[in-house]
Amino acid sequence: MALTAHQVTLITESFKKVEPISLKAAEIFYDTLFSYDPSLKALFKGDMKQQGRKLMAMLHAAVSTLNSPEQLLPVLQQLAKRHEGYGVKKSHFTPVGNALLHTLKVGLGDDFTPETRAAWVALLHFVADTMKAEMAA
């Protein structure tokens, strides 16, 4: 992963501001995701609050390993295989990434600077590229 030390700081500090509102952030994320692509709602069978907790836990794991991405790689590879089993396709990563960026924008307000956004985009590309490499479709 080619994040600079400054990007790691931007991501880490901005995520610290989102974590206290994690349940609301997850709600914003899924509402936004389903507005971008309503067909994705069919992939979610369980309790959405629990799903939101899983999302925030995965984001926390990703953010906490930014300085040692080799720890994150096997987690993302396993996550990709599980998600593929749920029916997730490579094409779903774009609306997911866009929904996450929108959630960060809402949650952070003025603190979601262009520089912070660019750092998150770099992280999202790493996550998506790693997971998509493990998926067939």
Image: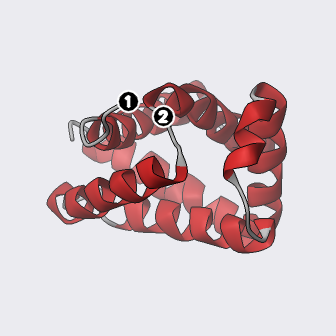
Judge whether residue 108 can be spotted in this image. no
Dot 2: within a 10 Å radius of its alpha carbon, few (fewer than 14), some, or many (20 or more) residues?
some
Secondary structure beneath label 1: loop
Where residue 15 appears, as percent x and y from the top left, is: 57, 58
Secondary structure beneath label 2: loop
Left or right, 122 with respect to 100, comes to left
**Residue 116 or residue 79, whichever sits in front:** 79
Label 2–label 1 contact, CB within 8 A: yes
**Residue 121 or residue 27, whichever sits in front:** 27
Judge whether residue 40 can be spotted in this image. yes
**Residue 89: mark:** 2
CA distance separating discs 2 and 1: 6 Å
Residue at x-position 36% and y-position 43%: 127
Residue with the mark numbered 1: 137
Image quarter (top left, top right, bottom left or bottom right) of the C terminus: top left
**Residue 73 or residue 114, whichever sits in front:** 73
Residue at x-position 63% and y-position 29%: 95
Left or right, 132 with respect to 100, comes to left
Residue at x-position 70% and y-position 65%: 52
Classify 42 as above or below 97.
below
Where residue 97 appears, as percent x and y from the top left, is: 56, 34
Dot 1: within a 10 Å radius of its alpha carbon, few (fewer than 14), some, or many (20 or more) residues?
few
- The part of the image, by quadrant, that contains residue 41 is top right
Type of amino acid at the residue the image marks with label 1 = Ala
Residue at x-position 46% and y-position 47%: 10
- Number of numbered labels in the structure image: 2
Going by the picture, which residue comes out furthest to the left?
Answer: 70
Where residue 130 appears, as percent x and y from the top left, is: 27, 41
Type of amino acid at the residue the image marks with label 2 = Lys
Classify 67 as above or below 87.
below
Image quarter (top left, top right, bottom left or bottom right) of the N terminus: top left
